[in-house]
Amino acid sequence: MNKLFTSIILASGLLVTSGSSLYAAPVNQSFDLARFRYQIDSKSVFHNKNVKEKARLNSLVSSSGTTLKAESKNPDPILTLPAANEVGSIDAPNNQLWYYTAQLDYIEIPPHDDVAYTDRVLQEYTFTIYDENMKEIGVIKDKMEYAENEVRTVLCELTPVVTRNFFNTDDKLEFMVALGVNRVDPLPDGTFDYGNNYRTLVYQLESKNDQGYNKPIDTYDDLVADVVEGAPDGDSDNFYITFMTDLFEPEGDGTGFWDFLLAQKVAINIYGKAIDEKGPRRIFEKIMPVIQFAGDQQDVPIMISTRRGDDVVYLIQEYALPFYNRYDDPMNDDMTQREGNHLIVNLYTASQTGLTQFSHTEIPVVLDTMNDENGNPTALFSYFSVGNLGYSRDILFDAPGASAEKPDFVVTRGNYQRSTDSIVNSFFTYNNDGSLKNTLCIYSAGAVDMGTIPGFGPQTMFVGSDRYGYVYNFIDLYTGNKVCTVDATYYYDDDSDPELLTVNCARTPAGDSYQYVFEMRYPLVDDDENDIMRFMYLNSDGTFSHIENVNMGHNVVYAQSYLSTEALAPHAYSDNDGKAYMLLIKRGQETGGNVEELMVADAISEKYPSGNTLLLVGPDDNGVLASIVPEFGADGSDGRLFVYYYNDTDRKYTLDIYSLPLNGDAGVDSTVLDSTDIKTEGSMLVAKGAIKVYSLDGKLVAEGYDKVEFASLDKGVYVVTANGKSIKIAK
């Protein structure tokens, strides 16, 4: 088990930062520890930072956008979590996935005195834990305890991992709740100092007070930033948990702005499991000035944890010296980059007795001014970091010439341009001794990870440009070699019009090689006015292979697909042969506006000439779609699809969980209908009682009693209802 700082790490391992402020260092005046809290990365694959970055890159490549709310024969969710203020999954013992709901009870304080808004103050919280079969494990319930200077709760989350034998040795389940509370402290001059207090409370189900509330067995005045599980220690779990806390430790006379910046620090404390009644043991401590954080001190992990075989490996990085030269006026442009600085990258292996350092690398931090054609500098700062491109994948243990003890690193250099208030990234590989090994891409517009293909090195698609337009350069990270280049505007044969390929791209195995799969920018519209999303497959050398099509139905205003190597694996979504795809669709309504729908569908094929919709869900009584998270099984089976809904009226979430792959026979097939309730006889639909036929955009197109003629209907996909059941047919 290995989790990331998900507030700064991308869901699928991407890539670049943009839009950073000129005042990168002064931003640290309001350093927020909550950004580093530990979470399972459950952000929607359609709304995470990865997708936002792809949207930004697509807007560079082209300014145009692409692209049923109907009852369909969807599979039933295998599990549904009841409506709650929060719902989610939690890593449990024996590699199980459990679930939880949270009920947060507030009192509302109406506007009063000089307060012009209604304040909501948390009074108590209840977390209900369920096992993988939705059997209730137990409840964590407690009252909020506010200190005298605390006013409201801004963070109340169940840390999504269950431990045993970590905080004590009694073999009972342990749950952690992260709390963040606004504080207000009066100052001698009559003003106030505002901030947040953070703490982590540890509970066991059995530990209760006289009022029936759970009683914390331990409390920490910091937040859990990382949890990693090593190889089992006999029959015992083998967790390592990192707590982080912010410190203010003045240096010098403590009066100037520079002293104020130097005083802001973060303590990293890594704990091993309890071996006696004294509880967890701190096995590593490091205090790091925020102004020496790697990268731009805002968007880069200061610590990366990973599993390598049975070993738990930590990477900790920082600048050797404060990144900037001393400056004392935060309102003036007197920030300059310090010369002679280095990025320090240290690697450690963990045991329950401590961390052992096995690698030390110093990488020169040199300003690249990016002079324009007139020789004028355009970049003020050059930030250096490891992990910006692929998190732990930026540690290249298996690169040629590297070793497990002396790995290479992917290093990102981000040049800050004041004129555009943005960062332009370049990517390199460095040897373990700090020397430059390969230049991967200079001044990249962005980058997309290409997933892992057995037998081939890790690969990234870097977006570049030439005088003809944008190009996609596929670079092997081990060798630095350019594998192939694909024009964003692609001619797949001599007679074709050019096709625009989006940056939404992934690799998928093909025979003894692999292919690239691109979502194509422009959809087609068939004779029945169905909108068709298209995917172009290119061979590993960039030559054209084929195009696959997915029928999205009518009135599609915009659509995007989720592409990854795992999502393109056989039977990832469907137990039918051939590829299936997951799409998020905005569909126009006759009454105006759009609704957002999730579609999982087989591609159009000989078996399914009109396509085959496996799942189609949208707004319902539970609210609107809020988050969509697929988790694929290792062998193409036993996956899960998490679909979260949010009801704005009662501010609650509901979670439906589907089993992957979906049953292919649940979709559209004109020859396979419900075996007992609705049948076909020639050109007639036959069922007992009333029969209604709807188009995929919800229009009633035919109806009858016992029999309905459908020969006169246009070609397309329809929903038939009878006897309280709904099926779909293709004509």
Image (spheres, rainbow, N blue to C red):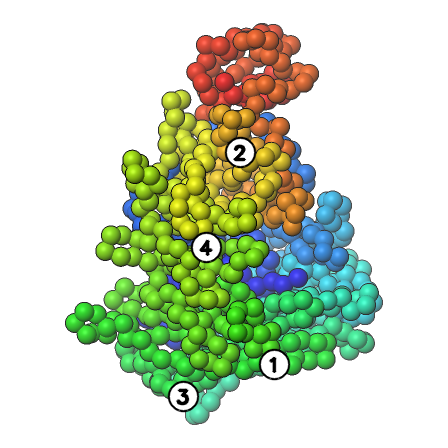
Q: Say which amino acid is labelled 3.
A: Thr
In the displayed structure image, the side of residue 471 where residue 649 appears, left or right: right
Label 3 secondary element: loop
Give the image location of residue 354, x and y in percent: 68, 80
Between disc 2 and disc 1, whose residue precedes? 1
Disc 4 vs disc 1: which is toward the camera?
A: 1
Q: Say which amino acid is labelled 4.
A: Asn
Rounded to the nearest angstrom, the CA distance separating label 2 from label 1 is 49 Å
Identify the residue shown where x is 21% and y is 70%. 372
Identify the residue shown where x is 67% and y is 66%. 309
Question: Residue 255, which numbered label?
Answer: 3
Report the front residue among 602 and 255.
602
Question: Residue 602, which numbered label?
Answer: 2
Between disc 4 and disc 2, whose residue precedes? 4
| Label 2 CA crowd tier, 10 Å (few <14, some 14–19, many 20+) | many
Q: Are marks 4 and 1 in contact (CB under 8 Å)?
A: no
| Label 3 CA crowd tier, 10 Å (few <14, some 14–19, many 20+) | few
Q: Say which amino acid is labelled 1.
A: Phe
Disc 3 vs disc 1: which is toward the camera?
A: 1
Between disc 3 and disc 1, whose residue precedes? 3
Identify the residue shown where x is 70% and y is 76%. 351
Question: Is 429 rendered above or below residue 559?
Answer: below
Rounded to the nearest angstrom, the CA distance separating label 4 from label 1 is 32 Å
Question: Is 311 rendered above or below residue 461?
Answer: below
Give the image location of residue 480, x and y in percent: 43, 66
Question: Residue 50, which numbered label?
Answer: 4
Report the front residue among 593 and 320.
320
Tell me where residue 134 sits by quadrant.
top right
In the displayed structure image, the side of residue 462 where residue 87 appears, left or right: right
Label 1 secondary element: strand
Q: Say which amino acid is labelled 2.
A: Asp
Residue designated by label 1: 358
